[in-house]
Structures are given as structure tokens and as C-alpha cells.
Image (cartoon, rainbow, N blue to C red):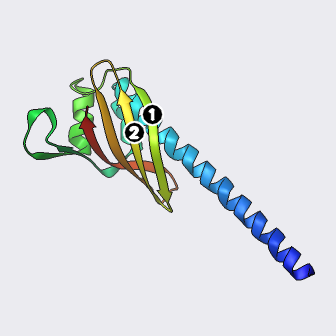
Amino acid sequence: MKTNILTLAMSLLLATACQAQSNKEEKLVKQVIMNFSSFGDQQDADGLDKLLDANFRIVMNQLFGSKEVSVMDKTTYLEKIRTKEFGGDKREVKIQNLQIDGKTALARVTLKGTKMTMVSMLQLIKNHAGHWQLVSDLPTIL
């Protein structure tokens, strides 16, 4: 009987610790997403640079009347932010769905601004230093 109670107590403690860790990671990922939007709105390429993995890319499927898929790498994206071609809007961010599996995360996010509204599927990774970074953005313009 004592063994069963001890096992139950240890299981509850472990579940509580896992949930606390999960909540912490969720908050960290959400903060990266909010900062991604904010730095884009402010056209802060240096701030964005820190949030984006070296392999970051935007995959645009038939956007702006195109019939093709276009891929934009991190360097090109940051240059478009620096030259003010991208960004500069004040967007409301709603994270509809967030799934974290170990060191990867996927979020469905609606970004509603004065210029346009888009839904993005954002992929994030937790790097070797333990920081969450964006690795991919797959936007759809509504």
C-alpha cells in the first residue's frame, strides 16, 4: 500500500514538473512569435536577425497573383526589411494553434494589419544554446 501511494505521489510530481516545463516552453515560443511580428512592424532587421535561424526561409505559394512557389532566404528577407520594402504595419497577432514537440514547434498565426491580413504557419526550432528561433514562414494572404 505504501509503495502504491509513493508511486502515485512521484507520478503526480513528475506530471506537474512536465506541465510546468511545457508551459515555460510555450511562453518562450509565443514570445518569439510576438517579437517576430513586432520587429517586422518596426522594420527592425537587427532584432529579426536574432530571432531567425540561419536557414530561415519564407515559402510563398502563389502569393500576389503568382502561379508559382517562391522561396525567400533570410538574407533577402532582412534586406527587404532594411530597405522598408517589407514591414512597417501595426499588426494584431493571434496564435490559434501551437504545438511543441521537443525542440521543434509549429504555430498557426493570424496577423491582421492595416495593409493586409495573413495566416502564417510558423516553424520554430530550439537551437543548441536553448533559444527558440524561426526556421520557416508559410504565409497565406486573406
Q: Quadrant of the N terminus?
A: bottom right
Query: What separation in Å lies between label 1 and label 2 (alpha carbons)?
Result: 6 Å
Q: Are marks 1 and 2 in contact (CB under 8 Å)?
A: yes
Front residue of 3/37: it is 3
Give the image quarter of residue 39: top left
Residue depicted at x 86% and y 75%: 6
Residue 41 horizontal/vertical position (percent): 36, 25
Front residue of 102/117: it is 117
Q: Is residue 94 left or right of residue 111?
A: right
Q: Amino acid at mark 1?
A: Lys
Q: Which residue is mark 1?
A: 94
**SS for dot 2:** strand
Residue 109 is tagged as 2
Q: Residues within 10 Å of mark 1 (few under 14, many from 20)?
A: some
Residue 12 is tagged as none
Q: Reading the chain from its start, which is encountered first: label 1 or label 2?
A: 1
Residue depicted at x 8% and y 38%: 66
